[in-house]
Amino acid sequence: MTEQVDVVVIGMGPGGEHVAGELAGTGLDVVGVEAELVGGECPYWGCVPSKMMIRAGNLLAEARRVPGIAGSASVSPDWAPVAARVRDEATDDWDDRVAADRFTGKGGRLVRGRGRLAGPGRVEVDGQVFAARRGIVIATGTRPQIPPVPGLDEVPYWTNRDAIAAKENPRSLLVLGGGSIGLELAQVHARFGTRVTVVEALDGLIPMEEPEAGALVAEVLRAEGLTLRTGARASRVRHGGDAFTLVLEDGEELTGDRLLVATGRRADLSTLGLDTVGLDPTARWLRTDGQLLAAPGLWGVGDVTGHGAFTHVAMYEADIAIRAILGEGGPDADYRALPRVTFTDPEVGAVGLTEKQAREKGLTVRTGLSQVPSSTRGWIHKAGNEGLVKLVEDADQGVLVGATTAGPTGGEVMYGLAVAIQARVPVEELRHMIYAYPTFHRGVEDALRDLRRD
Ligand SMILES: Cc1cc2nc3c(=O)[nH]c(=O)nc-3n(C[C@H](O)[C@H](O)[C@H](O)COP(=O)(O)OP(=O)(O)OC[C@H]3O[C@@H](n4cnc5c(N)ncnc54)[C@H](O)[C@@H]3O)c2cc1C
Ligand SMILES: NC(=O)c1ccc[n+]([C@@H]2O[C@H](COP(=O)([O-])OP(=O)(O)OC[C@H]3O[C@@H](n4cnc5c(N)ncnc54)[C@H](O)[C@@H]3O)[C@@H](O)[C@H]2O)c1
């Protein structure tokens, strides 16, 4: 039995839910297919609960900064309210009824199960086949990429899902991977009293961002008592007597009650029936054009496209696909000003290219750097003022192509620079505008002054 509908969306995470909900709201006959929870990784095991944990950890850190500035404070960390908030407020105990009702309330039809393509314009879910008149959208996200470390597949390691669902914070935690997931969760747990060790294979932390930002975060984490091993590869993992042992290539052995593997994420295209529409099921990402089209009548949005594993990218791409499916047209996807925030403390905001990426593109690069502690606001702020602003200029064009803003509210400070990069505001123009005193974003003015040819 084949059922005719207008649109089928496979995967109802932030990207898929947005496409499906908006299109259903226009009166189209939309089927949303979801194998797990409507809402996807972000609200149940990602952004939202992790940021609740970070909010709690940051409160503890702020309280510990009271001495010398505002008297004294005694802090007794307790994970119970954090775990309760994650259960009760963020995830409804991992129940997606509210999200499912939100979609069906717009007129959409939710089909629970695993969807796969069954030829052009057709999707199969557990034997049920839907033929889509207007289009199909693949929004199936990513899952953790587990590295081939000997022994790892035999031990009960944590992924982000276990870490988010944990009712207790462990006494000690090994974190494999010093990217966003690893560092955000590492710092939170350390602030709650867990002994944390981070092992990162590359030479610095958050290696996809500017090395200055990684070095700054490393300095702060070390000062907070975390043990960091960068440029370190695990050669074996063991588990016994309730403890994990990570053996590094240089022979060092690290132990912990829990092991969190946060070594990146990957899309799994192998089970989506892509071969039935002439696409490569062994590809790393679903390749799309500027309108997010992967093949005639087939769109891809979100993590699965490989343009940046962020909820805001999924939502942005969803909007483009919605317009394309409705035949409204509109500009192609433009990732020049793609913003990222690693929600460590200091927060690391970043947008556009890093200096290295700009040089690899053959641009004539000038960089400018300023330090938050030497700005007026940073000096006033005192404890917890670590941070920097780094700008990357295309010197031939006289415009910024990248920026990093680490520090208190670093993610918010980044916004103005994202506008500058997106709108190609001339650096000369940025140099001659007024920056409110004494804000953290005045560090941008200092960094502009520092722009020089290297
Ligand atoms: C710990 C953590 C913290 C994060 N923090 C942030 C943050 O602060 N800010 C930010 O922007 N991003 C953050 N992210 C990333 C963010 O969660 C993802 O970028 C976002 O969820 C991607 O949305 P998506 O719709 O592409 O995919 P997903 O959210 O992965 O949703 C895909 C959905 O598709 C379903 N699915 C897969 N295959 C099928 C199939 N064949 N049939 C039916 N359904 C299927 C899955 O069950 C899932 O529900 C974080 C991620 C993690 C893990
Ligand atoms: N604040 C945010 O927006 C936020 C937060 C968390 C996650 N995310 C998204 O989720 C994605 C996945 O997060 P992630 O932290 O898993 O990936 P990541 O790519 O950010 O970092 C993974 C890190 O693990 C390292 N690594 C890989 N293999 C290793 C090994 N065998 N041993 C030691 N280190 C190894 C990598 O060099 C890298 O630094 C991020 O890229 C990001 O897009 C976003």
Image: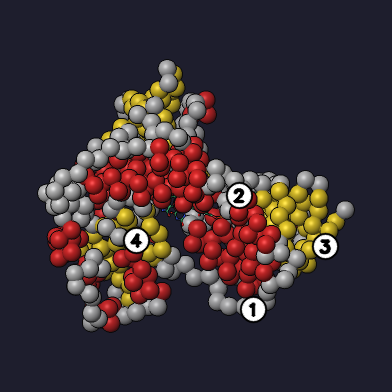
Q: Nearer the viewer, mark 2 or mark 3?
A: 2
Which residue position is annotated with label 1?
Answer: 328
Residue type, numbered disc 3: Gln
Amino acid type shown at disc 4? Gly
Q: CA distance from mark 1 to mark 2?
A: 31 Å
Q: SS for tag 4?
A: helix
- Pointer 2: residues within 10 angstroms few (<14), some, or many (20+)? some
Could you say whether the residue bearing mark 2 is in a helix, strand or loop? loop
Q: Determine whether the beta carbon of the residue marked 2 sits less than 8 angstroms from the nearest atom of ligand 1.
A: no
1 or 2: mark nearer the eye: 2
Q: Earlier in the sequence, mark 1 or mark 2?
A: 2
Say if residue 384 shows up in the picture: yes
Q: Position of residue 275 (x, y in %)?
A: 72, 52
Residue sitting at 35 percent across and 30 percent down? Answer: 172
Q: Measure the C-alpha gap from mark 3 to mark 4.
A: 45 Å
Residue labelled with disc 4: 411
Residue type at mark 2 is Asp
Q: Looking at the image, is mark 1 or mark 4 nearer the viewer?
A: 4
Q: Position of residue 339 (x, y in %)?
A: 41, 63
Report the residue marked by disc 2: 96
Amino acid type, mark 1: Glu
Q: Tell me how far mark 1 sits from mark 3, CA to CA.
A: 23 Å
The vertical placement of 251 against 126, above or below, is above
